[in-house]
Image: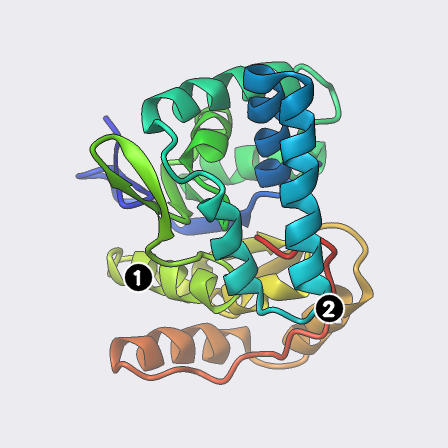
Amino acid sequence: MAETAGGVRVDAGHRPAYLVFCDVDETLINCKSMFEFLRFQLVRRFGEEGEHRYRLVEADLKGRSAAGVPRADVNRAYYRSYAGESVEEMAALGREWFTLASADPGFFIASTVDELNRHRAAGAEIVLVSGSFPPCLDPVAEHVGARHVLCSSPVVREGRYTGELTEPVIGEGKRAAALRMLAEHPGVNPRDCFAYGDHPSDFPLLDCVGHPRGVGDDPVVRGYLARRADRAAAAVSGCALACWSMGRDEHSEGCSGGCALPLC
């Protein structure tokens, strides 16, 4: 039985053949889950007023991004909009959102789902990695059979979100989360593991494994994968884990991509 702690779904006593790390938004599903859910829950609860509230939050976050505010800070700003909200209510609304959204045949990216199914059949554990949060991600994880969810963890007090965030799981945060997961699986060789991403911000995650995979047609991602193919992937993944275990930061590929909604 899986249990969730700090945004990580953990299964005791299970030894996978290897790990498969998978970004979620626009890698596994065809949308930005945080924005889709924000709009859904606000409109569901407040009707037309909820749509107005959503537009205000969306404009604020886009404005921060356009002004050059770091992605991690934009991510934190998103979660401030949940200050005072009930964790239980948001979880219920998240499942309602997923039920309706996933009824659309295009909600999931079929090729990614097929890959994850193939890996699970080969004995791998699926690990979702995202800057989104449990109300959006838990139903997705259950649907695709993911055993772990590495995601942003909003601070909770007395059953309600405070609006603060412990650590955004975006960019370098994805690398840190993936390396912690690898360290918790000493019998798994990072060189045997896979990672899927669609955006240059996923490079720190893709750096951690021997088999990085791109989803979509971003030319910067294609260039990164071509460079990885030209050098020893084993050295990259092994070095990343070794550096992390010694408390150091491995120098990563630069992120030269842009995103209108840079949250995850």
x, y percentage for residue 139? Answer: 47, 25
Disc 2: CA contacts within 10 A as few (<14), some (14-19) or many (>=20)? few
Q: What residue type is labelled 1?
A: Arg
x, y percentage for residue 19? Answer: 41, 50
Residue at the (59%, 61%) spot, across then down: 202
User: Can you identify the residue that label 2 sits on?
Assistant: 257
Q: Residue furthest left?
A: 13
Splitting the image into 4 quarters, where does residue 57 fall?
top right
x, y percentage for residue 124? Answer: 41, 43
User: Can you identify the residue that label 1 sits on?
Assistant: 180
Splitting the image into 4 quarters, where does residue 200 fall?
bottom right
User: In this image, 54 relative to 156: left or right?
Assistant: right
- Of residues 198 and 167, which is closer to you in this image? 167
Q: What residue type is labelled 2?
A: Gly
- Of residues 200 and 20, which is closer to you in this image? 200
Asked if residue 70 shows in the view, the reply is: yes
Asked if residue 29 shows in the view, the reply is: no
Q: Distance between the residues labelled 1 and 2?
A: 26 Å
